[in-house]
Image (cartoon, rainbow, N blue to C red):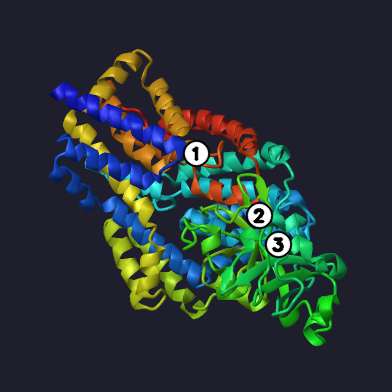
Amino acid sequence: MHNLQIAIVLLVLVAVFVAFVQERIRPDVVALSACCLLMALGVLPVQDMLKVFSNSAPITVACMFVISTALDRTGVIDTLGRAVTSRAASNPLRSLLVVMGGAMVLSAFINNTPVVVILTPVVIALANAQKSSPSRYLMPLSYATILGGTCTLIGTSTNIIVDGVARSRGLAPFGIFEITWMGLLYGVAGLSYLALIGRHLIPVRETFSTVMPDTSKRQFLAEVLVPHGSPLIGKTVDEAGFLRKLGVRVVDVIRNRVSLAGELATLRLVPGDRVVLRTHAADVLALRDKGDVLFEAQGAHAIEPIAAQNTVIMEGIVGPQSRFVGHRVADLNLRRLYGVYILAMHRHGENLGANFEQVRLSFGDTLLLEGPPEGLRQLFEQRALINLSEPTERPPRRDKAPIALGIALGVMVLAAGDILPIAALAMIAATLIIVTGCLEADEAYQAIPWPLLMLIFGMLGIGYAMEVSGAARFVVDHLFALVRDLGPLVVLSMVYFVTMLLTEFISNNATAILITPIAIGIAEQLGVDPRPFVVAIMFAASASFATPIGYQTNTFVYNAGGYRFTDFVKVGAPMNLMLWILASFLIPVLWPLTPQ
């Protein structure tokens, strides 16, 4: 029975890895489903599964996201980001170094995802001002925030999770700045590579920002009504013929308040249809001012003007907390809610100009939008999309910025002084954020990435199943038999490499949760201090540079910068190898592999 349980756990673990790589099902759903299966089979006792919800690491991660969101909503990140980019010069290399250095410092204390989200439109504006492609800056921006996150315990959720797993195995807690020296050396090496070599490997890619019309050039949308008796009744848009006469394009047909944009090719017009036209020409003004667009068949007016409005074109990207994630484009109702139309969609290196209405949006998808400035402003202010065409507007709670900044600094100072555990400090700080009005309670709940927390809880549950079933010991014993003659230095390097490889294809937090107890077990078998192995996992689990899917910030800039998958391989793979070699030498120096 014992061997059967080990086999079940390992089979489930393999299935989880396969599901993570295929990405057909959300990772959090995969992890929780695996836990439920293990409980149903009796491999994971219910009381052990419930223990994961008492783990302090996920709670700390949630509270740190609340603090980061408060710094965002009060304008702290925006102010710091603008201060960084304002020091950038016309010299591309200096600009790149300023952007990367500033992003690295910010992400050492603030979760790196909001840093990238806030700085992306600022960096795009900087690139446009220098007449350069945003793709030359966005990948380094993501890499710099990843490097910055490794400089402190709170810089990334991965460090907090690894520390929590290590403490559950009996290791002493990590201090907030214990890994800082290693992080600084690691970061300087990474930035130097990007400045000297990597930037020459980054291609110039077209994005909506570089190919779309000038957003300052006003265009016009107009709605016209198909009245009773119109000669257009029963005809398709192509058969109507007025497009060629006016030089306009039909954007949509609205019937009974329902958009029929996806059926324009075959749709036949009926009385009462509202036809939405778009044009760069001033001819559409005649529809609004005179209503004298005539088709002479039987003396009837073919169409009658209803409304016209001034519009602009802007680019928006789906953020990590957007309510649009998982929804079809056709179901967003942007026209009804904001008067905004989606002209094109960009995903994974493809510009989709049509037939995207049935696509379900995911984090990082980029949309080309057209609509009235006021409608677009409301859309961006509600954080449904992030504006890439221009930096975000002034945050509504800037007067609370000193409070939010003071609370964040208080967490770091008190944590450095070991006054209270980091989990307690994070909870107190998150509560103060709400009490002082930096965030509303509802905003704080929305700031928490619940899918990430559920993924962490699920992977912790699988970790418990490996422990109680003996699967973890089974894996450690067999791996130790393979590596015991290689020596602890080589084994440490191998642990880093395997973790780095896995984190390129599955969640970095999931990788860290699974590898940390195994690495600790191997170190104990080798008779050396396991702390250097834990540090190796902290850095390797964040070392996702060779693919756009291993780290959330990479996914975000993947679409915003118009990159291809191979661009990350070309730039990031050499960086991964360089940092692997560097870490293999630095970690044993800073954390000696002394016998236990």
Q: CA distance from mark 1 to mark 2?
A: 22 Å
Please state which of the two labelled residues, at mark 3 or mark 1, is closer to the viewer. 3
Outermost residue to the top = 485
Residue lying at 28% horizontally and 39% vertically, measured from the top left: 34
Please state which of the two labelled residues, at mark 2 or mark 3, is closer to the viewer. 3
Determine if residue 341 is in view. yes
Q: Residues within 10 Å of mark 3 (few under 14, many from 20)?
A: many
User: Label 3 belongs to which residue?
Assistant: 125
Determine if residue 171 is in view. no
Could you say where residue 414 lies in the image, as x and y percent from the top left?
33, 61
Q: Is residue 47 above or below residue 378?
A: above
Q: Are marks 1 and 2 in contact (CB under 8 Å)?
A: no
User: Secondary structure under badge 1?
Assistant: loop
Q: Is residue 55 above or below residue 383?
A: above
Q: CA distance from mark 3 to mark 1?
A: 28 Å
Q: CA distance from mark 2 to mark 3?
A: 15 Å
Dot 2 amino acid type: Val
Could you say where residue 197 lies in the image, as x and y percent from the top left?
69, 36
Residue 150 versus residue 12: which sits nearer the camera?
A: 12
Q: Are marks 2 and 3 in contact (CB under 8 Å)?
A: no
Left or right of residue 438: residue 519: left
Left or right of residue 284: residue 26: left
User: Secondary structure under badge 3?
Assistant: helix
Please state which of the two labelled residues, at mark 1 or mark 2, is closer to the viewer. 1
Residue lying at 65% horizontally and 38% vertically, measured from the top left: 567
Q: Which mark is residue 98?
A: 2
First along the sequence among labels 3 and 1: 3
Left or right of residue 138: residue 6: left
User: Label 1 belongs to which residue?
Assistant: 543
